[in-house]
Image (cartoon, helix red, strand yellow):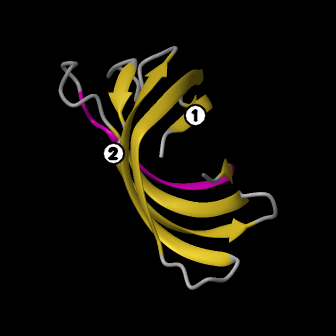
Amino acid sequence: AVEMIPLYLQFQSGTVYGAGLTPFLLRYNFTRGGRVAPFIELGGGTLATTEPVPEGAARFNFTPQAGVGLQYLLAGRRSWTLGARYHHTSNAGLATRNPGINAVVVHTGLSWLR
């Protein structure tokens, strides 16, 4: 899958805005033929922000991530997703300072299935 993050907010000494793209998101659904399917996922993407995140680091970061969740199948080949991810933000050494940020992110979304 591909995931877009249209608005990223980071609260540090000031509010930082950004956007991200996860072009690599692999998900394995544990389907049983029902409407609810638990899943695990693994991905990696990028994040661009208006100010360095974390402070003093870089405005461009990479975002490796792994998580779990539930996918609920709706009518018309759509699904609603609720999940939680371990999310790491790091500039991978592109800047002198690279402290990284580790977080647990709760996410929800609507998907259109093929």
- In the rendered image, residue 36 lying in the magenta stretch gets the answer no
Residue at x 79%, y 58% (from the top left corner): 76
Is 74 left, or right, of 106 in this rendering?
Answer: right
Task: Find the magenta span and give its range.
Answer: 98-110
Location of residue 60 in the rendering, given as x and y in whole percent from the top left corner: 37, 20
Could one spot residue 13 in this view of the protein?
A: no
Dominant secondary structure (helix, strand or loop) of the stretch shown in magenta = strand
Label 1 vs 2, first from the N-terminus: 1
Label for residue 64?
A: 2
Residue 17: quarter of image: top right
Instruction: From the viewer's side, name the closer residue of 81 and 65.
Output: 81
Q: Which three-letter amino acid code belongs to the residue tagged 2?
A: Pro
Mark 2: which secondary structure? Answer: loop
Location of residue 6 in the rendering, given as x and y in whole percent from the top left corner: 63, 28
Instruction: From the viewer's side, name the closer residue of 53 and 107.
Output: 107
- Decide: is 95 above or below 102: above
Mark 1: which secondary structure? Answer: strand
- Decide: is 12 above or below 27: above
Location of residue 96 in the rendering, given as x and y in whole percent from the top left corner: 18, 19
Location of residue 16 in the rendering, given as x and y in whole percent from the top left corner: 57, 22
Whole-angstrom CA distance, mark 1 to mark 2, is 14 Å
Residue at x 65%, y 62% (from the top left corner): 82
Label for residue 5?
A: 1
